[in-house]
């Protein structure tokens, strides 16, 4: 889902009522959200683990926290998930969904199947075999070709390319020829595909992207790749043909995972690494070639978020 920022002023009690949680401290006006590292007046934020309040706190700050802060005099709401609740608050009070519809300057085949509430921006190209699920967004100049199925509430950012021909060929008696590609690209729900990212057309088996995956800008996903749910592929990563990424793993910026390798569930591969051998479940690996450094620890899998 794509959102636009809106200006709005609410009361801290309105936010507490929305969350269904009690509030401690005086009521205040809230006009925006802010990061806990840069507190501003009339804002809502959250206290991460180990957060230490600065000596000077702006007026009218509403803090979401996992532990009571009554001794500070700060207006706060105790919640089990401060950061996630801040995201909910921003979406509810300070964002509005982009308008659905197909821009007249987009190129959408008459036989493409476009779901309800889909937003297609100027210059996007959606081919005849493409399916785009309800509530998804395709931004300017994105290209969706061949057999591509995109689930619900997905975001395809500008200049992304999905389902175009892969870098595959063979040498035959008549010279070099492209390999046959008859597979589909199947993308689950709530997936983000970054700007200038590429997901190649599959050969004989489908390229599969699971639910909740985040593929950052300038990343490359080769053909016949299988990516599990909740995987994070960060900026500039290269995932070569036939790779399997297990559920919940994190591929750092500029990582290269070479052909047919596997990265296990809930594992982390550090920035700039080159994966030449399989990575087991629940470990941190880094280097060129990547080597296992330790087991996954607290915070290793956290979404960068706010």
Image (spheres, helix red, strand yellow):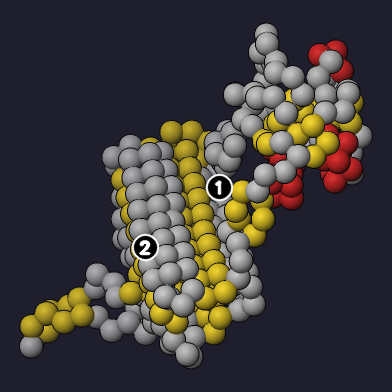
Name the residue: 20% across, 76% down: 169
Q: Nearer the viewer, residue 6 or 182?
A: 6
Q: Quarter of the image holding residue 168?
A: bottom left
Q: Quadrant of the N terminus?
A: bottom right
Q: Position of residue 293 (x, y in %)?
A: 43, 33
Q: Position of residue 76 (x, y in %)?
A: 82, 27
Name the residue: 83% across, 24% down: 75
114 is higher (above) or lower (below) than 272: below
Query: Would residue 91 be seen by someone viewing this image from the given angle?
Result: yes
The answer to whether marks 1 and 2 mark residues whose Cβ atoms lie closer than 8 Å is: no
Tell me the residue that label 1 is attached to.
Answer: 266
Q: Which mark is residue 170?
A: none
Q: Quarter of the image holding residue 32?
A: top right
Identity of the residue furthest to the left in this view: 174
Identity of the residue furthest to the bottom in this view: 111
Q: CA distance from mark 1 to mark 2?
A: 30 Å
174 is higher (above) or lower (below) than 3: below
Q: Which mark is residue 159?
A: 2
Q: Earlier in the sequence, mark 1 or mark 2?
A: 2
């Amino acid at each position: 889902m794509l959102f636009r920022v809106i200006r709005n002023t609410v009361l801290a009690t309105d936010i507490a009522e929305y969350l269904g949680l009690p509030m401690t401290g005086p009521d205040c006006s809230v006009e925006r959200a802010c990061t806990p590292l840069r507190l501003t007046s009339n804002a809502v934020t959250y206290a991460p683990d180990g957060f230490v309040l600065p000596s000077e706190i702006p007026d009218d700050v509403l803090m979401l926290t996992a532990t009571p802060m009554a001794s500070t005099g700060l207006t706060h709401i105790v919640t089990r998930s401060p950061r996630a609740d801040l995201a909910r608050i921003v979406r509810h009070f300070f964002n509005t969904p982009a308008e659905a519809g197909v821009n007249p300057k987009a190129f959408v085949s008459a036989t493409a199947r476009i779901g309800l509430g889909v937003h297609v921006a100027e210059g996007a190209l959606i081919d005849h075999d493409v399916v785009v699920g309800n509530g998804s967004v395709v931004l300017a100049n994105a290209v969706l070709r061949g057999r591509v199925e995109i689930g619900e509430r997905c975001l395809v950012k500008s200049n992304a390319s999905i389902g175009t021909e892969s870098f595959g060929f063979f040498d035959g008696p008549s010279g070099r020829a492209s390999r046959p590609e008859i597979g589909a690209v199947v993308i689950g729900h709530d997936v983000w595909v970054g700007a200038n990212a590429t997901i190649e057309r599959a050969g004989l088996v489908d390229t599969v992207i699971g639910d909740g995956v985040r593929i950052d800008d300038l990343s490359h996903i080769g053909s016949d790749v299988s990516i599990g749910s909740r995987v994070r592929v960060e900026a500039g990563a290269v995932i070569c043909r036939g790779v399997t990424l297990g559920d919940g793993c994190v591929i750092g910026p500029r990582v290269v995972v070479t052909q047919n390798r596997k990265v296990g569930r809930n594992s982390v591969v550090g920035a700039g690494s080159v994966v030449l051998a399989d990575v087991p479940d629940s470990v941190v690996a880094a280097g060129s070639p990547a080597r296992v450094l330790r087991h996954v620890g607290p915070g290793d899998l956290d979404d960068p978020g706010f």
